[in-house]
Amino acid sequence: MAKKISFTDDKIRYTLEFTRDSVKQMEKNGFSISNVSSRIVTSYTELFKGAFIANHPDVEEEKITAIFEAMPEKTKLFEKLVAMYADVINTLTADPEEGSKKIVWKADW
Amino acid sequence: MVSEKLSTNTDETQKGGGSDWAAPFSYSKIIDDNLPYYLSYGMTYEQYMFGDVELAVFYRKKHEIEEQQYNYHAWLQGMYVYEAIADVSPILHAFAAKGTTVMPYSSEPYAITAEQARLKSEREAKKKMEENKAKMEQFMLAFNSQRKKEEVN
């Protein structure tokens, strides 16, 4: 199952996830994952808004902004959102077979 | 590093409105480039674009399994052809002796699963038992017949 974030606000159940279509829409609107890695603040809100596209495309921007403001643990939230966003591409690439040589890498951001 | 490549795209995306489709690391390009492969694996466009992203992992695995099965069946077909040629090989050369016969082709398919092998083994054991039983009955008939002759004499 794809990674999802669920919460309830004003008695409405929201499920945030990324699909390939929603990622394409985000990039068409100018979003780039590189902005998140460069720690550009607006990109975090864009990432959060983009997570609504798949299941809640009709939610107004003001509502999303209000939900964003009310969200606790934003750092952890964005870590999860970035992981979900990356999964859109990661699921398209094969993992190395068990037992074969694996390269250990580490990101510096 | 990926972040170094991505930084070349920062100015473009900062301006907003439209992504740089020629960017070295565009998720959209990767998504579009992989679409034909996953369509060939049997995934629908809707599943690929709008469905659970992890579905692609299972379609990729499905494709690998299908490739293994196809390879196995191609090998099995080759085995049947090899056996057929081997069976008729006694008469396939110009100087085969008159009256040379061919070997009979296998009367049943190869047992390729454990269950098929087990059933084949049972059938062969049962056939052998019946043959032995028939031989034993013939021997008994002959023996009894011989004894009766001796008693009469």
Image: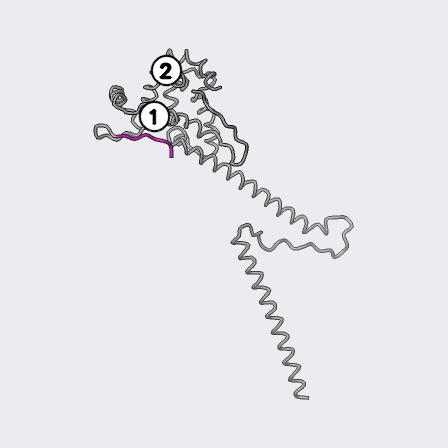
Which x, y percent locates residue B87? 67, 51
Contact check, label 2 and label 1, Cβ < 8 Å = no
Disc sitting over residue A76 in the figure: 1
A107 in relation to B44, above or below: above
Magenta residues, start to end: A1-7
Q: Which mark is on residue A97?
A: none
Is the C terminus of chain B in the top left, top right, bottom left or bottom right quadrant?
bottom right
Vertical relation: A15 (above or below) B79? above
Q: Residue at x 53, y 54 (%)?
A: B116
Amino acid at pointer 2 = Ile
Distance of label 2 from label 1 (alpha carbons): 17 Å
Residue B59: horizontal and vertical position, in percent?
A: 45, 35
Q: Is residue B141 above or below residue B130?
A: below
Kindly give the residue lying farthest to the left in the view shown: A10
Q: Residues within 10 Å of mark 1 (few under 14, many from 20)?
A: few
Q: Earlier in the sequence, mark 2 or mark 1?
A: 2
The residue type indicated by label 1 comes to Lys
Residue at the right extreme of this rendering: B95
Q: Looking at this rendering, what residue extends furthest in the bottom direction?
A: B153
Q: Nearer the viewer, mark 2 or mark 1?
A: 1
The residue identified by callout 2 is A40
Please, which chain is the residue tagged with disc 1 on? A
The residue sitting at 32% across, 30% down in the picture is A5
Q: Residue at x 69, y 54 (%)?
A: B102
Residue B137 found in image quarter = bottom right
Q: Return the residue nearer the eye: A16 or B119.
A: A16
Q: Nearer the viewer, residue A11 or B68?
A: A11
Secondary structure of the residue carrying tag 2 is loop
| Horizontal relation, residue A73 to residue A108: left or right | left
